[in-house]
Amino acid sequence: MRLILLGPPGSGKGTQAQRLVQRYGIVQLSTGEMLRAAVAAQTPVGIKAQHIMASGGLVPDEIVVGIISDRLDQPDAARGFILDGFPRTVPQAEALDELLKKKHIKLDAVVELRVNESALLQRVETRVAEMRARGGEVRIDDTPEVLTKRLASYRALTEPLIHYYSERRKLLTVDGMMAIEHVTREINRILAAIGAVEAKAAKKADEAKRTAKTGKSGAKTAARTASKPAAKGTGASGKAAKASRKAGKPASRRAKKSSRKASAGSRVRSAGKARKSAKKVTKKRAKA
Ligand code: AP5
Ligand code: MG
């Protein structure tokens, strides 16, 4: 699975990326984390980036594109990845398109976490408090002043990507105002609905979680099986998503419809059914 998580500072990209990593066994590629590591190590990139990051600006495109290009070449990215905080500008998105094309890699979806701006400061303040409580290092850019600037950068330079990926029928929007658990569930559901993950893997992961919660025996085996990557199903189910895409319905709306249907039954319904309902909707639309 190859995903991009898009959203303003504090929207939950890092939180959800880690949950997806645990569930699907793919890697999180966070340019923010990589840059912070470079700053801490005082590498040439880190030295260049540190003042820009501290002031809430964006590090030059060529630097982050270079970092991501190198990172995508590493073996652990071959099974799939979640890009967290990249791309952040249209030129970065174009560079990523080129990189993926060269590597013959297809992007499954761009998940936009939509959160009211008024909630972001509170979230960042909570993160600061949690960090302090753990004795961890507080991020230099987690202040109300810098957050305002990070938000301004997001609006001016990153928000255009919503249109960019919507036009390419890759955008799936999720309500990031829900509780963390609910956001995760919604992401998993829409990924299954578009065929980006094998429903079987998603179902097994859910079962394993439930079994672990109730403390029943066999939880470990189930969890081991469920944590296996779901790459196998991407090809066939991707075709279904492609077919309905051809009929001209944006991915976000398709997923919303089929996920509404999926939610009527069990928590995670088979992607086969979700795909069928997506197809039905598409056929109806084509007829209309
Ligand atoms: P980066 O590290 O990417 O930061 P950011 O985009 O500003 O986002 P955050 O990491 O602050 O938030 P998040 O969305 O990950 O939320 P989180 O899950 O932590 O970038 C930092 C800087 O590096 C940039 O400003 C820039 O200078 C530079 N940079 C990075 N990438 C770049 C690029 N591609 N190009 C140029 N420059 C780049 O959640 C936040 C808090 O909220 C947590 O406490 C969490 O527990 C809580 N929370 C999460 N979800 C929920 C929920 N649903 N309900 C309640 N609380 C929640
Ligand atoms: Mg983050």
Image (cartoon, helix red, strand yellow):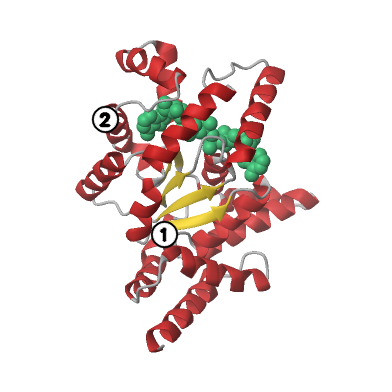
> Which residue is pictured at 60% across the width and 50% down the height?
184
The foreground one among 240 and 228 is 240
The amino acid sitting under disc 2 is Gly
Which residue reaches farthest left?
102
Tag in front: 2 or 1: 2
Does residue 86 lie above or below 262 as drawn?
above
| Res. 201 image quadrant | bottom right
The foreground one among 114 and 4 is 114
Q: Tell me if label 2 and label 1 are in contact, CB under 8 Å.
A: no
* Residue 29 drawn at (x, y percent): 42, 36
The foreground one among 256 and 78 is 256
> Which residue is pictured at 69% across the width and 23% down the height?
129
Q: Give the label on residue 66, or none.
A: 2
Does residue 251 lie above or below 68 as drawn?
below
Q: Earlier in the sequence, mark 2 or mark 1?
A: 2
Image quarter in which the C terminus is found? bottom left
The 10 Å Cα crowd at callout 2, few under 14, some 14 to 19, many 20 or more, is few
Assign a secondary structure to mark 1: helix
The amino acid sitting under disc 1 is Lys
- Which residue does the numbered mark 1 point to in the structure image? 232
The 10 Å Cα crowd at callout 1, few under 14, some 14 to 19, many 20 or more, is few
Q: How far apart are labels 2 and 1 at the CA level?
A: 29 Å
